[in-house]
Amino acid sequence: MSKNIDLNEIIESLQFEGEFMGSKPFGSGHINDTFKLDFKAEEGQKSYILQRINHEIFQNPAQLMENIHGVTSHLRKKIIENGGDPERETLNVIPAKSGELFYKDSNGLYWRAYNFIDKASSYDIVEDPELFYQSALAFGNFQRLLADYPADTLHETIVDFHHTRKRFDTFVKAVEEDVCGRAKDVEEEIAFILDRKDYTSILVDMQEKGDLPLRVTHNDTKLNNVMMDNKTGKGICVVDLDTVMPGLIANDFGDAIRFGASTALEDEQDLSKVSMDLDLFDIYTKGFLEADDGSLTEKEIDTLTVGAKMMTLECGMRFLTDHLQGDNYFKIQRENHNLDRARTQIKLVADMEYKMDKMEQIVNKYR
Ligand code: ADP
Ligand code: GN1
Ligand code: MG
């Protein structure tokens, strides 16, 4: 951990059980700083996830944690009713000793902790199509368990998170301002996005007209946000609940496709390796529609393929915006990392455009 952080202060302030044994950085998320903590407790070793909440992005940590606590309590109740294991099938917030859902340390940093989902893994790429299918069931099931959650009690943790048209406007502004002088080197990528201006309005317009309902959605459904059981291969726990907010089904479906149906990592530099795999698209669509209990509307199902292209275009736009603005949002591990990410998304959008008819046929096969 960074030298300014007093880990002891944080550990002392949260309700962990047992004697602290050690910590290590964990996962490959782009937003929060995540650590696994190990403790020796009476019943044996016990682990927790500790996260520094990125409070530049989530500017109201109290509201963020209120959302997560509400949602996980709801899930916990349903999991118990269904005879599941509430310690492994949902995140559980480990509160601070003060009773608050997070701890603000003496440096002004915000920390939260969860039960550690043991004997499970998350994946940055689909290694076995069956895992991708299982992740579709897990996200579909998550969505179903939250279908009766009172949406009006949820705070909007990031305003207009998937308002793709507003994301486009922000992108245009970043190009115009060009604060790092990088625009001249990415003219082709910029033009690709500018050409798709009208597309960015499709889903938000439909929602505003009342053609698509807002539901409680996850909004960040990439494969590494679901823990897969090491033994059974089932998607046992959906994590990363920071963006659970009212949203569109098409976007939850689409973001999962964007990440998981790609033949390469999100930051692959060799673009010849990047394409949208129709077999993976097929298997995810199958799982996602199987998990639906009949409550999705015809229009929601009609827009699944649009969601796939929309989320990929939006994400490419967001990566390129961050590259142009100087990499302030997504964590980077190398120079031009966000540009590499933007390029994979652009390649995927182009490939989806080419394969759109086939994608639609697949959705129609399972609806
Ligand atoms: P970020 O917002 O930065 O993506 P996440 O909440 O997704 O942060 O956490 C990063 C990674 O840590 C996840 O992709 C997952 O692999 C792992 N992770 C998160 N929560 C848990 C948990 N409770 N148990 C085990 N692993 C977890
Ligand atoms: C971020 O937090 P993480 O790494 O799971 C981002 C998503 C992007 C994704 C791209 C809060 O997800 O919106 O789609 O990176 N999360 C936030 O990989 O912005
Ligand atoms: Mg994550």
Image: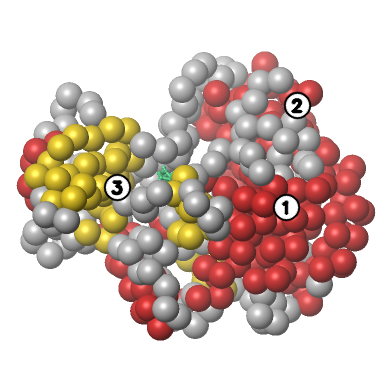
The quarter holding residue 262 reads top right
Task: Identify the residue at horizontal 44%, vertical 31% (top origin).
Answer: 331
How far is mark 3 from mark 1, CA to CA?
31 Å
Q: How is the image coloured?
A: secondary structure
Q: Nearer the viewer, residue 58 or 232?
A: 232
Q: Is residue 122 above or below residue 365?
A: above
Q: Amino acid at mark 3?
A: Ile
Which residue is label 2 attached to?
273
199 sits left or right of 153 in the view: right
Which residue is label 3 attached to?
49
Which residue is label 1 attached to?
308
Q: Could you tell me which secondary element the residue under label 3 belongs to?
A: strand
How far is mark 3 from mark 2, CA to CA?
34 Å
Q: Amino acid at mark 1?
A: Ala
Task: Identify the residue at horizontal 81%, vertical 48% (top origin).
Answer: 279
Identify the mark nearer the N-term, 3 or 1: 3
For label 3, being within 8 Å of ligand 1 is answered: yes
How far is mark 1 from mark 2, CA to CA?
19 Å
For label 1, being within 8 Å of ligand 2 is answered: no
Q: Nearer the viewer, residue 60 or 330?
A: 330
Q: Could you tell me which secondary element the residue under label 2 belongs to?
A: helix
Quadrant occupied by the N terminus: top left
Identify the mark nearer the N-term, 3 or 2: 3
Q: Is residue 341 above or below residue 54?
A: above
Q: Mark 1 against mark 2, which lies toward the viewer?
A: 2
Q: Could you tell me which secondary element the residue under label 1 belongs to?
A: helix
